[in-house]
Image (cartoon, helix red, strand yellow):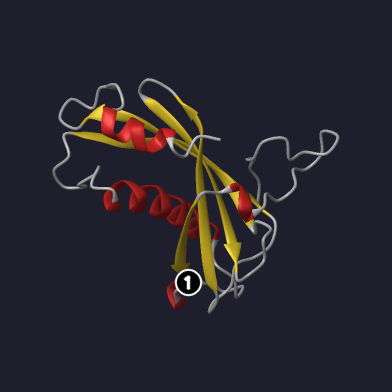
Amino acid sequence: MSGQAGQGNEKGGGREEPVLIDGFSHVLPITTRWADVDVYGHVNNVVYYSYFDTVVNEQLVSAGLLDPQTSPIIGLVVETRCTYFRSLTYPAPVRAGMRVAKLGSSSVRYQIALFQGEDPRAAAQGHFVHVYVDRASQKPVPIPDPVRALLQTLVV
């Protein structure tokens, strides 16, 4: 398990420290599923990325800024990374925190952290980069103004 995320969370160039949930203004509850657990009895690492994708796209869809089937401009994932601190388990609630670390002209870098139960420290944290493209041409385009307005509210 490897990766990186967070801001200023490394101590002396070593492994970063888990971020705290109070640093996130957008938090989405996610219910772990039986199918999320692997043979080792914990949520499989690939599922963490699914949770990352869920918190980002839920925010865009619920704000009416993304229709996955018809939006002419969409965000494509071009980079993602995760650092794992503790295993997530089933059954136990997960809270996914999301904030914007960098907002460019056609791309956005989200910082995401996953918290289990009431623990304020991240069990895992990472980043997720969207590049906005024209759906038909797949060429980068500027982030649409309504999307940019929402993302600016999440900038740290």
Q: Does residue 123 appear left or right of residue 99 in this picture?
A: right
| Placement of 49 over or under 144, stated as above or below | below
Helix, strand or loop at mark 1: loop
Q: Residue at x 53, y 79 (%)?
A: 91
Asked whether 105 or 51 is in front, the reply is 105
Residue holding disc 1: 32
Q: Residue at x 65, y 59 (%)?
A: 123
Considering every residue shown, the one lying at the far right of the view is: 12
Residue 37 placement (x, y as % from top left) = 52, 72
Residue 36 placement (x, y as % from top left) = 47, 69
Q: Residue at x 64, y 40 (%)?
A: 6
| Placement of 150 over or under 45, stated as above or below | above
Residue 105 placement (x, y as % from top left) = 37, 20
Q: Is any part of residue 130 visible from this angle?
A: yes
Residue 141 placement (x, y as % from top left) = 27, 21
Number of numbered discs on residues: 1
Q: Residue at x 64, y 65 (%)?
A: 87
| Placement of 100 over or under 64, stated as above or below | above
Q: Does residue 60 appear left or right of residue 5 in this picture?
A: left
Q: Is any part of residue 38 visible from this angle?
A: no
The residue type indicated by label 1 comes to Thr
Q: Does residue 75 appear left or right of residue 92 in this picture?
A: left
| Placement of 13 over or under 32, stated as above or below | above
Sort mark 1 into few (<14), some (14-19) or many (20+) by Cα contacts within 10 Å.
some
The image quadrant where one finds the C terminus is top right
Residue 41: quadrant of the picture: bottom right
